[in-house]
Image (cartoon, rainbow, N blue to C red):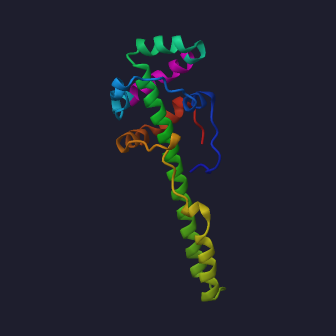
Amino acid sequence: MPEMGFLRFTVPFLLLIMLPLPAVPHDHEQLQTPFSAAEIERFIEDWPDFVTWAGMGEAAVERGLAGRGWHTGRFYYVANQVSAGLVQLEEAERLSQAAEELEQQRAAIRQSPHLTDEQKEQMITRLGRQPAASTPAPAGEAGHAVDSAELLLIHAWRDELKRVLRIDY
């Protein structure tokens, strides 16, 4: 398992997290419905070209996405959810690993023949005060939680998403 710490991002992923969501009229609320497996597959396939189009300007993005059958707002919605979901998954993994390490430390303290019961209790109490063990995972980018069905899809496609977005943890 790779060492957890600061994420190293490449330009395509930075582009993803900086996407401005276009103004979408209120009658397009269906653009905000949870995405499907077919859409995440299309997103993965179309992302590299999107990066190229983004370098050519907004008009090129709109033409390119329309040519691939995307409504611009829907593509941006999927991109935003993928970004937030990947952050949520990474944070959940980091917190799980921290909790596991904390429990291993507690077990080592309990089994130590060189400490009194009082010393063991004090050390375990101090361990419980560490922020990493008690900090809840964030809801995701922009403070919103990703739909659970979307999060399952993001998890299932995580390696492919990281590859196409060029994310290196």
The quarter of the picture where residue 77 lies is top left
Compared to residue 60, the image places residue 113 above or below, namely below
Q: For the point 46% across and 26% down, which residue is it?
A: 76
Taking the image as shown, residue 48 lies to the left or right of residue 127, namely left
Residue at image coords 40%, 19%? 71
Q: Position of residue 24 (x, y in %)?
A: 42, 23
Q: Which secondary structure type mostly characterizes the magenta part of the structure?
A: helix
Asked if residue 2 is among those painted magenta in the image, a careful observer would answer: no
Above or below residue 69? Residue 76 is: below
Which range of residues does the magenta coloring cover? 40-53
Left or right, 95 with respect to 118, comes to left
Q: Position of residue 41 (x, y in %)?
A: 39, 28
Residue pictured at 56% horizontal, 60% vertical: 98
How many numbered dots are placed on residues in this image? 0
Name the quarter where the C terminus is drawn: top right
Residue 127 visible in the snapshot:
yes
Q: Is residue 50 left or right of residue 7?
A: left
* Quadrant of the image occupied by residue 65: top left
Q: Position of residue 163 (x, y in %)?
A: 53, 32
Residue 160 visible here: no
Horizontally, is 123 left or right of 149 in the view?
right
Residue occupying the point 33% across, 24% down: 27
Q: Does 47 lie within the magenta span?
A: yes
